[in-house]
Amino acid sequence: MSDQVVDGTLSDEAQAAALEELQASPAPRGGSADGNLDVILDVPLSLTLEVGRTRLSIRELLKLTQGSVIELDRVAGEPLDVMINGTLVAHGEVVVVNDKYGVRLTDVVSPAERIRRLR
């Protein structure tokens, strides 16, 4: 059975689709109206702390030996960049907790800014 349109109206054989009205659903417990986040909470992410950067030529790279010092573009004491999957999310400083390194967040990039940087 095929639907036929004659003069902009459906033939007797065709029926209009019943569409439900969209209604706002209540926000989840976290207060977010973005939907249920439970499905992505266990997705692994890569967290990187960036101390600084530099550019080297291949000649300079090949000259590196044990004990070589590479100068970075950051001043001592400047905050580290905290990146998740390559996206800057915060700045922080290195701390030692129970003989392990950690990072104390000193500034968190706003969600709006994080989204803007993704584009």
Image (tube, rainbow, N blue to C red):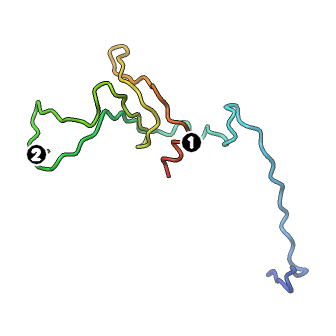
| Three-letter residue code for mark 2 | Leu
Along the horizontal axis of the image, is 20 left or right of 65?
right
Question: Front-most of 111 and 1?
Answer: 111
Kind of element beneath mark 2: helix
Image coordinates of residue 99 in percent, x first then y, are: 32, 15
What residue sits right under mark 1 in the picture?
112
Say if 11 sits above or below 83 in the image: below
Question: Front-most of 109 and 19?
Answer: 109
State the residue at coordinates (73%, 37%): 27
Q: Quadrant of residue 15?
A: bottom right
Position of the N terminus by quadrant: bottom right
Say if 68 sits above or below 102 in the image: below
| Three-letter residue code for mark 1 | Ala
State the residue at coordinates (12%, 33%): 68
Say if 97 sits above or below 66 in the image: above
Q: Quadrant of residue 40?
A: top right
Q: Quadrant of residue 88?
A: top left
State the residue at coordinates (41%, 27%): 92
Kind of element beneath mark 1: helix
State the residue at coordinates (91%, 80%): 12
Residue furthest toward the bottom? Answer: 6
> Which of pointers 1 and 2 lies earlier in the amino acid sequence?
2
Mark carried by residue 62: 2
Cα separation, mark 1 vs mark 2, equals 42 Å
The label nearer to you, 1 versus 2, is 1
Image coordinates of residue 10 in percent, x first then y, are: 86, 79
Along the horizontal axis of the image, is 41 left or right of 22?
left
